[in-house]
Image: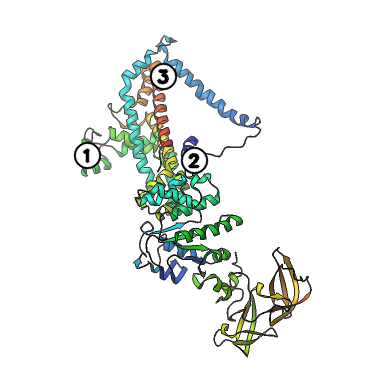
Amino acid sequence: MAEHESGDLQLVGLSKRFGEFTAVHPLDLTIPEGSFFALLGPSGCGKTTTLRMVAGLEEPTDGRILIGDTDITHARAYQRNVNTVFQSYALFPHMSVLDNVAFGLRRKKDKDAKRKAQEALDLVQLGHTAAKRPNQLSGGMQQRVALARALVNRPDVLLLDEPLGALDLKLRRQMQIELKRIQQEVGLTFIHVTHDQEEAMTMADRIAVMNGGHLEQLADPTTLYEKPTSTFVANFLGQSNLLRARVTGSAGEGLARADVQGNEVVIDAAKVPDGLTDVWVGVRPEKLTLGESGGRNRLHGTVVDASFTGVATQYLVRTAAGADVVVVQQNDGSARAAVNENVTLSWEPGREFVLDAAQDDHAGMDEVA
Amino acid sequence: MAEVALGTGGAPARPRRRHVGWVPYALLAPGLLWLLVFFAAPMFTLGSQSLQEGNVFDGYVFTGNVSVYADALQKYWPHLLRSVGYAGAATVFALLLAYPLAYVIAQKAGRFQNLMLVLVVAPFFTSFLIRTLAWRTILSDTGPVTELAQRLHITDLLQAANLINNDTLLSSKFAVIAGLTYNFLPFMILPLYASLDRLDHRLVEAAEDLYASPFQAFRHVTWPMSLPGVVAGTLLTFIPAAGDYINSRLLGNTQTIMIGQVIDTQFLRVLDYPLAAALSFVLLLLILALVTTYVRRAGTEELV
């Protein structure tokens, strides 16, 4: 669907310092043309600064930005074929909705500005609001106008700076699906900056997780969730139970034997980082089963808290060694456990991930949005 | 100025209807009373005075003599036109000087913002008259300003433009307009500052993101967004400047007499009260007509 070949967006050793503070450490990223890419991280992780450098609103301290073969590192914002949907929407209050959307086209002296703007408004289902002023629209509608205003220019790269942050939860879910649909329809490269891990996973083909100005991990949503490479990613994306373990030997069939707080478990040997014996064994709450039906690996403990959320029940189980483990049990009719009940938890080997024990098991925990 | 601000800022929210007690009237009463005694009543007196005949020794009698208005216009229309012209020129110069200054104070001054605002207001600590008298010293024939202007041939330039009559600066069109510009400059800066201070810098960023060069971003975003301040500032400058009688007297010559000075003379020296009152009314109506047209135009102007 893309009208012209623009090429991939490449960030080469891109960094930004504000005085003594380094907002973005040298960053290398390639964002394939036509992909829906998310920059995910807690506030202050450098994701917005990275986005602003791509937009041309911030001058990089070092490094280069390329679209295809064109170096745009030092091009001014208005010279780049890159458009942004701002967090504050930044709609021009003194113009009609249609004039807002046509703004970019008119600057490019497009003779068809009005018709194209109207079409873009129709695409976001706001064709009927063309003559209104932005402040006459609701937050969700303004957000869609901001999207149309950027989309209509068919930029090489469309930047979204937490565009859904100001919307309520229901509207946000709706807009996530809508954004994804529009991206597939127009086929442009979208870079979405967000601190909402669920939003990033719902929409993006690939996600770059950033923390403290560094890139933590770059992968598709499934890989990020199933095989996080750091405790930060494990904790920031969803919930993780990180169990301190010691790898004791091989169990055959590609499995390794490990000691978790006195319980012997078997884990996927391929997941153990080379040469490590002190590790974190991470198991997602939904991969643990209350009772013994979940698989070969067992843990024992006492239920200290149970909260019913409708589709599921979330248990907090304290193991004999004093570790707190979160278990999510689907509300599928199976027996529920009561607080203070002694329970057995089980999981199937291979459903865990393994990280170096040298990492902080609380990294990224406080930042969960 | 409220109408001005609303006129360009989009539709205001309709207030919800509810019971209105006596409190609003009580709050309005002192102000209304003040206006009644010190504005409405004098206006009425002035109006009736303009239709009286007589002289200061035998007293004036109300005769409904409307022809005084025709006389006033016939005799003093050059002064009226000149006043509008000078005030208009001073307004334009004040805008040209004030806009960049207000922009810097509002958007770039950072921690110096308050200091700069105080400096803008500082001249108000001395009287209008003193400030204008000071300009006589500044522009005096033997002063350094005149000397410098002569050496740089600025005087030749001004003379060619018919703004001064000889190679000195004082007692000229130039001096009167410069004085008016200076005296009313703060009235231009402050409303401009207020509207530029409110301007969200992210809108300018958005414009640049949408392919607008810095100039285009100014032309299509900053300028139209600051129009309420421009309208307020130009009115606050033009209206008092058009009726001013100090600058033309202290800095001008016999060829630069403005209508305010004429009225002043008629009232206090010639003692021709009907003529002075009629001229006051003419000036009032003229300014009202000009301002109404201007505000209408500025309010409905296509901003994009």
Same chain shared by disc 1 and disc 2:
yes
What secondary structure is marked by label 1? helix
Q: How many marks?
A: 3
> Which corner quadrant of the image does residue A14 belong to?
bottom left
What secondary structure is marked by label 3? helix
For the residues labelled 3 and 2, the Cα–Cα distance comes to: 40 Å
Where does the C terminus of chain A fall, quadrant-wise?
bottom right
Label 1 packing within 10 angstroms: few (<14), some (14-19), many (20+): some
Label 2 packing within 10 angstroms: few (<14), some (14-19), many (20+): some
What secondary structure is marked by label 2? loop
User: Disc 3 marks which amino acid?
Assistant: Ala
Same chain shared by disc 3 and disc 1:
yes
Disc nearer the start of the sequence (3/2)? 2
User: Disc 1 marks which amino acid?
Assistant: Leu
Q: Residue at x 34, y 33 (%)?
A: B88
Q: Chain of mark 2?
A: B
Q: Chain of mark 1?
A: B
Eye-nearest disc, 3 or 2 = 2
The picture places residue B4, in percent across and down from the top left corner, at: 46, 36
Q: Which residue is mark 3?
A: B277
Q: Which residue is mark 1?
A: B157
Disc nearer the start of the sequence (1/2)? 2
CB-based contact (under 8 Å), mark 3 and mark 2: no
Q: Residue at x 68, y 80 (%)?
A: A295
Eye-nearest disc, 1 or 2 = 2
Q: Is residue B127 visible?
A: no
Q: Which residue is mark 2?
A: B10
Q: Is residue B87 visible?
A: yes
Q: Chain of mark 3?
A: B
The picture places residue A315, in percent across and down from the top left corner, at: 72, 70
